[in-house]
Image (tube, rainbow, N blue to C red):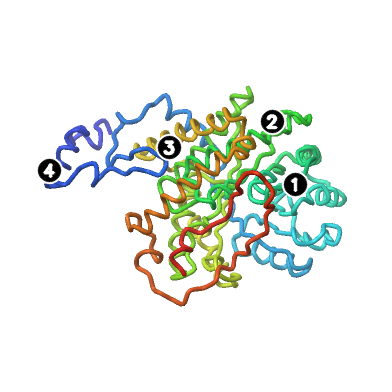
Amino acid sequence: MNSSLFSEFSPTDKEAWTQQALKDLKGKDFEKTLLWNTPEGFVVEPYYTGDDIEEEKTVPVQAAQQKKLGWLTQPVVVYENERVTNAAIMALLQKGVDAVTLDIKSIPIEKIELTKLLNGIRLSDTPIFFKTNGQNAALLSSLQTFIAYQMKGGLVEDGLAEWMTKGELAENYFEELAATVALTKSSPHFKAICVSSHVFHNAGANAAQELAFTLASAVTYVDKLTDAGISAEEAFSKFYFSISVGTNYFMEIAKVRSLRYLWQKMQGAWGLELTSAYIHAQTSTYYDAAITANTNLLRATTEAMSAVIGGCDALTVHAYDAAFRLPDEFSERIARNISILLKEESYLDKTLDPAAGSYFLENLTQQLVDTAWRLFLEVEEKGGLMAAFEQNYIQDQIEQNAHSALESLQQGSNIMVGVNKFRFDEEPVKDAVNVESVKDSVPYRLLQNQRIAQSFEQ
């Protein structure tokens, strides 16, 4: 076909569109009606064209999105005993699950017969991500007694996140982490360093803050590990990002894409070959409601879509009732099937970077990249993540945003279905999330996991 399919249409002119919009608004204020002022501090327009895209910035962002197609469906399994937990994992693998986060932090590793726990599970085929509560070295030593092949999966422990919520960090933590990285050298696909954004997200951070502080945390790990004798190349290869994905649909797509690009920008700063970040995403607990709880299913679905369209490597969808009770088999199945349906019925695993080429999403991604990078540099100027946190700089930034978000809900300028609108007033329930004791002698404020809906549920 020699002629363009769209040759009969006149070229798009943004100014002409704006004039037509002004006419249709019939006197309403254009900026107040159609412009979106984001919590991250930039303005989103209602209409974009190719003229709004800076190709020299967009091309490297798109190039950074090159990764393996699809994502792993990765639910959490909490350890009970070897037989029951093994049966639970094997059953999940028959129901469309690709990987598992295995929470064994409540019991000493030496009391677990790992050969029974992992019976029938080959870690070179099924990635297992272990939560051990500081028992990583013991776990790896035990695994290596009977596993002679290269493992996939990783260790889900972020010591800096623990420090920011509890005020405690072992004096030799980074030396032990370096030893753990060394122990996993023979398994290049096993991730030994977890950097979590949940600590920032659940305290009320916006997308730019979440990105900036997560990057600052990752840089702290690289600095500490290289000081301990681990090469920068080896350290970068062992990172595992675990991020929360919230309800701001398009912004969260941009957030995942931005993280992948910014991580490569960080690699370039170290003079390393550019490799793709490994990004695990999980649906947000911050936006869960304990009343009119079925609306959490709507939020989880859009959050999961944002995660996979943004290009996550693994996805955890938590149960809709997890905010106020122990999830049952039904709620866990529904959560798991959200990820599976996005693959099997929506085919979102068949397209690499589906957001690429959207003038709106490319522009949003670029604004988020620029804003997050500036904030990251501000943190570095203050001495890095730990120094900025000890100065309460990070806490101040997050608390200001959390306060503004809550105020918007209370005033009704922002709508959260089932919380401040379209709500069915069931009997208020007590939050099932346990509040852990924290060290009260530290000279800086600690971050706390929150739910923005809590104040509406009393």
Question: Can residue 153 be seen?
Answer: no
Element type where label 3 sits in the image: helix
**For this view, does 443 lie left or right of residue 34?**
right
- Which residue appears at 35% of the width and 65% of the height? 421
Residue behind mark 2: 223
Residue 309 percent across, percent down from the top left: 46, 47
Instruction: Identify the disc placed on residue 365.
Output: 3
Separation of marks 4 and 2 at Cα, in angstroms: 56 Å
* Other residues around mark 2 within 10 Å, as few (<14) / some (14–19) / many (≥20): some
Question: Can you see residue 81?
Answer: yes
* Amino acid type assigned to the residue bearing label 4 in the image: Lys
Crowd class of label 3 (few under 14; some 14 to 19; many from 20; radius 10 Å) = many
Residue that numbered label 1 is attached to: 151
Could you say whether the residue bearing mark 4 is in a helix, strand or loop?
A: helix
> What is the quadrant of residue 213 in the picture?
top right
Mark earlier in primary sequence (2, 1): 1
Say if mark 3 contacts mark 1, CB within 8 Å.
Answer: no
Q: Name the residue under label 4.
A: 23
Quadrant in which residue 47 is drawn: top left
Q: Is residue 300 left or right of residue 241?
A: left
Q: Which residue is drawn at 19% across and 44% down?
A: 29
Disc 1 crowd, CA 10 A, few/some/many (<14, 14-19, 20+) = many
**Residue 374 pos. (x, y %):** 48, 30
* Residue 440 tag number: none
Q: How far apart are marks 1 and 4 (CA)?
A: 62 Å
